[in-house]
Amino acid sequence: MDTELPDVVVVDDNAVMLKYFEHATKNLALELHMFKSANAVLPFLMENKPQLLFLDIIMPEKDGLTLLQELRRIPLHLDTLVIMITSKDYVQDRTVAKKLGAVEFLTKPMPMVAITDIILKYINKDNPY
Amino acid sequence: MAKSYLHFWGVRGSHASPFDSHLQVGGNTSCVEINVNGHILICDAGTGIITLGNKLAAQQNIKEVTVILTHYHWDHICGLPFFEPAFIPGWKINFYGPGESIQEMKQNLDSQMQAPYFPINTENWMANINYIPPSTKKIRVGDMVVKHHCVHHPGITYGYTVDTGKQKIIYVSDNECQFLDKSIKMKMTEFSEEEQTFLKEINRGEYEYELKSIKDADILIHDSQYTPEDYEIKRGWGHSCYVDVVNSSIDAGVKQLYLFHHDPSNDDSAIEEIHEKSINIIQSRNSSLKCFIAREGLEVELN
């Protein structure tokens, strides 16, 4: 039996938002990797394909949609499951995210259960949570 | 040494509004020239860039400009097909804007100059067109250093900080400021106490990001499109209510605020009223912030 925990990556420049994710997922059997910028996560993503990748949109220097566009050019991430997490609830952003293959678009503020529900929807259905 | 100035060529948001009732403020869409010692930076290419282009084409000293685009919505690029220097051999035009690649930037500009919408395309530009790679973090234009940050507006949209070496000018043409704050307040009761504690901290972090992006600006040019009444209806359209802009400017220690990207449905008197109310907020908060209406044709001398 494969006992390796699924990798979930969150990229958000707001440190408290990362803590929110950490708190929301504390009872889930997963390995949470948190990064504060597109540039910080890139070295990790060059070598790893997480089961789920949460991306904020508005971040300093490089935004989450541009990062996703870059990732889709990398064979490893052609089909990585990506969920946008943003306060930007605009049709244009939803359209671009969908075109780039993001599977969900989660708007802030979201309850913790929205985070765990999405994680359970996409990974590890037998999670003991 | 040439004089240094900032000139508003287009101040209107959304679409041009060349109506009699609007001309004291101006009807052309976004375009601001920052000229430091003869080096020209053009912020956005709305219809305002047409008049600027005519002026540039008529002189002989300067043959290079850099155009920085906040995003590719029509009101920010629709002057480019009529920007005369682009059609003159010997000119060099540098473009910078959001995008993942030069190809994407070029495509975004090409798209509006194609049949059947326009008779010629960007291939017909005769100037030397140089697309600055979007991955460039700092652009240098003469003594100016330009950096971007992401703002709250549909699609990827930039605000720009221009450091002239003596002054910090920040250009944020389109931005819905304090958006998350309002979203959290509207939904706060739906969250548990524990979540509320987190959300207050998340909100504080977001506001700090907003303030940091305009902090200590000598000159801030900012989207102030809506009144509170407009904003009730148009929340989520990507533009700011002037009340939030003035308060953020005070909190960020901005010295001069230029109310910009005026709503085309607001005539001159409506914008004067927005300005008066902005002054009232500043006075009520005992702030030293100076607030002006960005008017087409207004020239601000730089140090």
Image: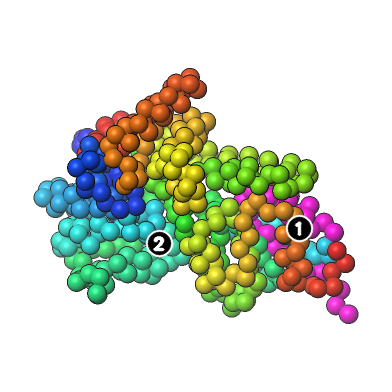
**x and y, in percent, of residue B151 in the image:** 48, 49
Between the C-alphas of marks 1 and 2, the distance is 41 Å
- Residue placed most toward the observer, B13 or B21: B21
Magenta residues, as a range?
A1-27
**x and y, in percent, of residue B144 in the image:** 35, 43
**x and y, in percent, of residue B45 in the image:** 29, 54
- Residue at 35%, 41% (x, y): give it: B260
- To which residue does mark 2 refer? B133
**x and y, in percent, of residue A16 in the image:** 69, 46
- To which residue does mark 1 refer? A113
Q: Quadrant of the C terminus of chain A?
A: bottom right
Work out whether B295 lies above or below A118. Answer: above
- How many other residues sit within 10 Å of disc 2, few (<14), some (14-19) or many (≥20)? some
Q: Please say whether residue B245 is visible from this viewpoint.
A: no
- How many other residues sit within 10 Å of disc 1, few (<14), some (14-19) or many (≥20)? few
What chain letter is assigned to the residue under label 1? Answer: A
Looking at numbered disc 1 in the image, what kind of residue is underneath it?
Answer: Val
What chain letter is assigned to the residue under label 2? Answer: B
Work out whether B77 lies above or below B203. Answer: below
- Residue at 20%, 59% (x, y): give it: B82
Work out whether A21 lies above or below B189. Answer: below
Looking at numbered disc 2 in the image, what kind of residue is underneath it?
Answer: Pro
- Residue at 66%, 56% (x, y): give it: A35
Q: Quadrant of residue A1?
A: bottom right
Left or right of B180? Residue B284 is left
